[in-house]
Amino acid sequence: MVTTLIFAELLIVGFQVILIILLIILTFGGHHLLMLSDIKDWQSLLTLFMLASSYTIGTMFDRFTHYIFSNKYDKIKETIIPNPPYSTSVMRSFVTQKNDNLNLLFEYTRSKIRLSRATAINMPFITLFFSLYFLSHLSFENLTVKISILITILIFGVSLSFLSFFSWKRLVITYFRIIQSNYEAFISKNKTDQKD
C-alpha cells in the first residue's frame, strides 16, 4: 500500500509539471502545435510515455521541492522537537518497530506532505500559464465576461496555492507531533518495563 501511495503521488506531481510544460507550449506556440487529430493513432504509446515521464519528472520535482521547503521544514521540526535525543528518523523507527499501523500513518502523512508541497509550487505556475493562454488564445465578444473568467481563474489558482502551502505546514506539524508524542510514550513504557 505504501509503495502504491508513493507511486500515485509521484505520478500526480509529474502530471502537474507536464501540465505546466503543455501550458507553456500552448501559450507561446499556439494550440495548433498539439492537434489531437494528428496524434490519435499514437494514443497507446503516448499514454505509456506520459506515465513513465510523469513518474520520472514527479520524482525529480519531489526532490526539488524538498530542497526549496527544507529550511521551513527544519524550523518547524526544531519548534516541535527542540533538542531531539536522536534524529527524527531514528525516533520514528523506535516507535514503529512493532506497530505497522503507526508506520502506515507516518507514510500516509508523508505522502500528503509531498503532494501538498509540490502543489504549492506548481499551482502558481499552472495559474499563470493558464491565464496567459486564456488571454492570448481565447476570444470573447464581451470583455466583461473575459475579465470575470480571468479573475475567477486567478482567485481559484491563488487560493489553491495558499491552501496547499497551509496544508503542507499543518501536515508537517502533525507529523512531528506524532513522532514526539509516540517517542515519549515509547520511552515512558520502556522505563516502566525496566522497573518491573
Image (cartoon, helix red, strand yellow):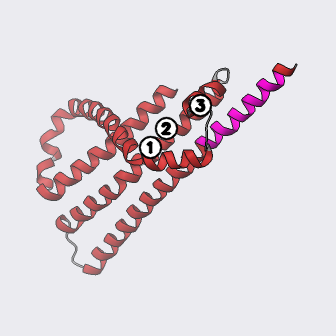
Residue tagged by mark 2? Answer: 111
| First along the sequence among labels 1 and 3 | 3
At a point 73% along the width and 29% down the height, the residue shown is 187
Horizontal side, residue 193 vs residue 171: left or right: right
The answer to whether the residue labelled 2 contacts the one labelled 3, judged by CB atoms less than 8 Å apart, is no
The answer to whether the residue labelled 1 contacts the one labelled 2, judged by CB atoms less than 8 Å apart, is yes
At a point 15% along the width and 48% down the height, the residue shown is 34
Q: Position of residue 61 (x, y in %)?
A: 33, 40
At a point 35% along the width and 72% down the height, the residue shown is 151
How busy is the neighbourhood of tag 1: few (under 14 within 10 Å), some, or many (20 plus)? many
How busy is the neighbourhood of tag 2: few (under 14 within 10 Å), some, or many (20 plus)? many
Magenta span includes 157: no
Mark 2 → mark 3, Cα distance in angstroms: 23 Å
Mark 1 → mark 3, Cα distance in angstroms: 27 Å
Horizontal side, residue 151 vs residue 87: left or right: left
Is residue 49 shown above or below 131? above
The residues colored magenta run: 176-193
Q: Position of residue 97 (x, y in %)?
A: 64, 21
Is residue 99 shown above or below 149? above
Tell me the kind of residue under disc 3: Tyr
| First along the sequence among labels 2 and 3 | 3
Magenta span includes 177: yes
In front: 194, or 22?
194
Q: Secondary structure at mark 2?
A: helix
Q: Quadrant of the rendered structure where residue 148 is?
A: bottom left
Q: Secondary structure at mark 3?
A: loop
Which marked residue is nearer to the observer: mark 1 or mark 3? Answer: 3
Mark 1 → mark 2, Cα distance in angstroms: 6 Å
Residue tagged by mark 3? Answer: 86
Tell me the kind of residue under disc 2: Ser
Residue tagged by mark 1? Answer: 115
